[in-house]
Amino acid sequence: MSKAVILGTGSCLPKRIVTNAELEQMVETSDEWITSRTGIRSRHIAGRGEQNYQLAAKAGRRALAVTGIDPQELDLIIVATISPHMIMPSTACFVQAELGAENGFAYDINAACAGFTYGLDMANNYIRNRPEMKILLIGAETLSTRVNWQDRNTCVLFGDGAGAVVLTGTSDESGIIGSCLHSDGTLWQLLCMDSPESHNPDLRPDDWVGPHIRMNGSEIFKHAVRMMEDAVNTLLRKHGLGIADVNLMIPHQANTRILKNLRERLGLPEEKVFINLSKYGNTSAASIPIALDEAHRQGRLNRGDLILLCTFGGGLTWGSLLLRW
């Protein structure tokens, strides 16, 4: 049976880098406080000419360049994002226009930080039915447009950027093996972001304070570690594999405390976990594809390697995915 295989990766980060020292001038915080609690030392913040769709399109072009595939050969563009350029049309439609990929269709998905992993599962299902499809999947965020820059508990966490992969069908041993995806809408208040203020007063939430990211950090930590651990172990058992079979885990880059705790509970050595959080912060749906592209460029992904992705985000949404490089 055919399955989706990644042909190429690409990423794009805004030019401006904001360090913890700069944030000290904006909110009541310190480099030591941020680094010790999150592991983040800097993040990229978008400027003029770096809208969400522009970062996404550049990441997509770089992924396509690796494969030699022309944008007009694309059948589908999916963009995972919680910080779209506009509510309508989709960011994916803007990317389609930027790339000149008029022969495919395009849409966005919103599964918060789990969006890219959800997107890989969707692409895999498309390709199982039509192995010849060529799909561009992008995770792209400009979270600097969605944080409250007076809230020191959240504004220090997030960054902007985009990562992309090009997928098509294969019948050999490489490609996506399987996934284990979950969501729990009853826990939405632990990590959420309001919409712009409603123009219908009857539909305006009583506790609306602005279209900002809100988070209960301590509760998120407890749920994230347990839920990702369960998703990883369930997926490995389903395919008759153990954690020792994994060559590299690329997790959602949220917080070093979460990642350290998860790694230890899974029994993975440090060298088998790819972490670039310190440079980019939490880029939500873009974090895994940015890390995947960086790992690829560093030579950390070799043909035949078993790669494990795991993620957790607002919704709550979480899950894991296995692929053979």
Image (cartoon, rainbow, N blue to C red):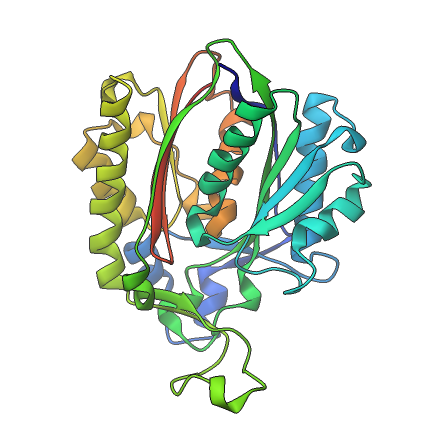
Q: Quadrant of residue 5?
A: top right
Along the horizontal axis of the image, is 223 left or right of 179? left
Task: Give residue 239's position: percent from left, percent from top.
Answer: 29, 20
Residue sitting nearer the eye, 187 or 60: 187
Residue sitting nearer the eye, 199 or 254: 199
Residue lying furthest top: 172
* Residue 87 visible, this angle: yes
Q: Quadrant of residue 131?
A: top right
What residue lies at 22% left-to-right and 61% top-to-bottom? 219
What residue lies at 69% left-to-right and 22% top-to-bottom? 67
Residue lying furthest bottom: 201
Residue sitting nearer the eye, 289 or 125: 125
Q: Across the whole image, how many numbered discs are drawn on residues?
A: 0
Q: Quadrant of residue 6?
A: top right
Along the horizontal axis of the image, is 139 left or right of 182? right
What residue lies at 47% left-to-right and 85% top-to-bottom? 204
Q: Is residue 29 above or below residue 295?
A: below
Q: Is residue 141 above or below residue 321?
A: below
Task: Give residue 213's position: percent from left, percent from top.
Answer: 43, 68
Q: Is residue 278 above or below residue 243?
A: below
Task: Give residue 287's position: percent from left, percent from top.
Answer: 48, 45
* Residue 282 visible, this angle: no
Task: Give residue 110's position: percent from left, percent from top.
Answer: 50, 54
